[in-house]
């Protein structure tokens, strides 16, 4: 029995070999009608593509690497979910690679990864998406990449992020509208651009409402629950104590909520608490956390989709977009009462 080839499929479908290849690789530049016709011929001829031959023919591995270094397991789970959705859509596999930004071994680590794993491209999550050193290295090596949640000025690469500054502004303004003026702020990881953007949004909201910025109300965190707990002790020991706390992510906010409860402070009657990200913990604890919904899955999905398109064929324009961050009000914030300091 004669072997069915991609040429046979193209002949029966009345399309070019390149079109069949695009359908085979789930590439986007094919009309729905043509895609359906080619898929029908696949079935009629009982054509089964050889994945190894497929990769060799196009000089691809059909594997996307994803770099991460984030203390929040929830965050990387959401990143992975969005990346996998895009990879499955276009017939790619995903390699999740933990790495450390600090320590001076970043580039050596990435070089080793590229030597041992044949990747078609990399998706960079924070803090790697803000590393100019890494971006320069990938450009030099001509490795396709896309950045997620990055504030790095790089007009030559795919970038999908949310408006962190505006989100922080809105949640601070929400607390101000509830009557709070002594609003504490817990910063995030110093290597993440989101940290300064959220801090900037917080300060901008205070300034626009003529509320003096108080450095004593700012604590240093790193996006981890434990750093939130340490920051909470500092903040709740202040005299006078602030009436509201805005933490740069939900895990740090949850730590503040736990300590406040242990100290028998009623939330939100005596202390309003807000977070950022809309991580699962924000919905699962009580009272539920007022937060900013950052579309992590959507950002990563779009970045990986655009990366795969760029790998498939050169794009006319570099895709860069900013997604909206939305305020979600829950039970952890309420109108300011006379706090018992």
Image: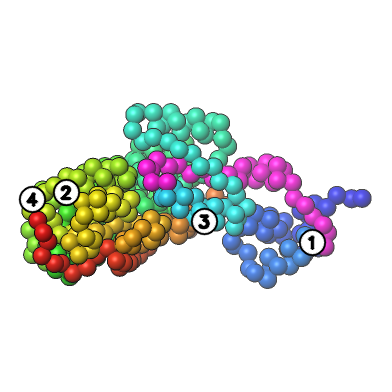
User: Which-is-in-front pick, marks 3 and 2?
Assistant: 2
For label 2, the SS is helix
How packed mark 3 is, by other alpha carbons closer than 10 Å (few <14, some 14-19, many 20 or more), is many
Task: Measure how far apart labels 1 and 3 are at the Cα level.
Answer: 27 Å
Q: Residue at point 15% right, 59% down?
A: 243
Q: What's drawn in magenta, residue-wise?
A: 44-73
Q: What is the total number of numbered labels drawn onto the structure image? A: 4
Task: Measure how far apart labels 4 and 1 are at the Cα level.
Answer: 74 Å
Q: Which mark is residue 43?
A: 1
Considering only order in the chain, which callout, 2 or 1, is on the residue closer to the N terminus?
A: 1
Which residue has dot 3 on it?
Answer: 305
User: Badges 4 and 1: C-beta atoms under 8 Å apart?
Assistant: no
Q: Residue at point 48% right, 44% down?
A: 66
Which residue has dot 2 on it?
Answer: 235
User: Badges 1 and 2: C-beta atoms under 8 Å apart?
Assistant: no
Q: Where, by quadrant of the figure, is residue 168 drawn?
A: bottom left
User: Which-is-in-front pick, marks 4 and 3?
Assistant: 4
Q: Give the x, y percent position of residue 15.
A: 73, 63
Task: Measure how far apart labels 4 and 3 are at the Cα level.
Answer: 51 Å
């Amino acid at each position: 029995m004669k072997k069915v080839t991609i040429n046979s499929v193209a002949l029966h479908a009345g399309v070019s070999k390149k079109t069949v290849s695009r359908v085979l690789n789930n590439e986007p530049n094919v009309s729905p009608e043509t895609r359906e016709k080619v898929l029908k011929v696949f079935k009629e001829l009982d054509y089964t593509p050889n994945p190894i031959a497929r990769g060799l023919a196009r000089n691809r591995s059909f594997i996307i690497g994803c770099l991460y270094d984030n203390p929040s397991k929830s965050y990387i789970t959401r990143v992975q979910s969005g990346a996998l959705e895009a990879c499955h859509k276009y017939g790619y596999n995903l390699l999740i690679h933990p790495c450390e930004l600090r320590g001076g071994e970043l580039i050596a680590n990435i070089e080793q990864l590229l030597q041992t794993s044949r990747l078609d491209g990399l998706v960079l999550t924070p803090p790697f998406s803000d590393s100019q050193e890494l971006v320069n290295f990938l450009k030099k090596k001509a490795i396709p990449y896309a950045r997620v949640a990055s504030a790095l000025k790089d007009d030559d690469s795919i970038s999908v992020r949310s408006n962190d500054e505006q989100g922080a502004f809105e949640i601070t303004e929400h607390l101000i509208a509830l009557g709070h003026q002594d609003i504490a702020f817990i910063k995030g990881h110093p290597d993440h651009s989101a940290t300064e953007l959220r801090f900037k949004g917080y300060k901008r909201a205070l300034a626009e409402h003529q509320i003096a910025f108080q450095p004593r109300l700012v604590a240093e965190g790193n996006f981890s629950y434990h750093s939130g707990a340490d920051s909470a002790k500092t903040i709740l020991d202040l005299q006078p104590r602030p009436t509201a706390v805005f933490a740069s992510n939900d895990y740090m906010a949850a730590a503040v909520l736990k300590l406040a409860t242990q100290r028998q402070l009623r939330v939100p009657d005596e202390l309003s608490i807000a977070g950022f990200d809309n991580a699962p913990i924000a919905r699962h604890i009580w009272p539920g956390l007022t937060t900013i919904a950052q579309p992590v899955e959507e950002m990563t999905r779009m970045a990986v989709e655009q990366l795969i398109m760029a790998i498939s064929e050169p794009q006319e324009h570099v895709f860069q977009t900013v997604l909206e961050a939305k305020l979600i009000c829950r039970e952890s914030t309420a109108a300011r009462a006379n706090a018992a300091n």
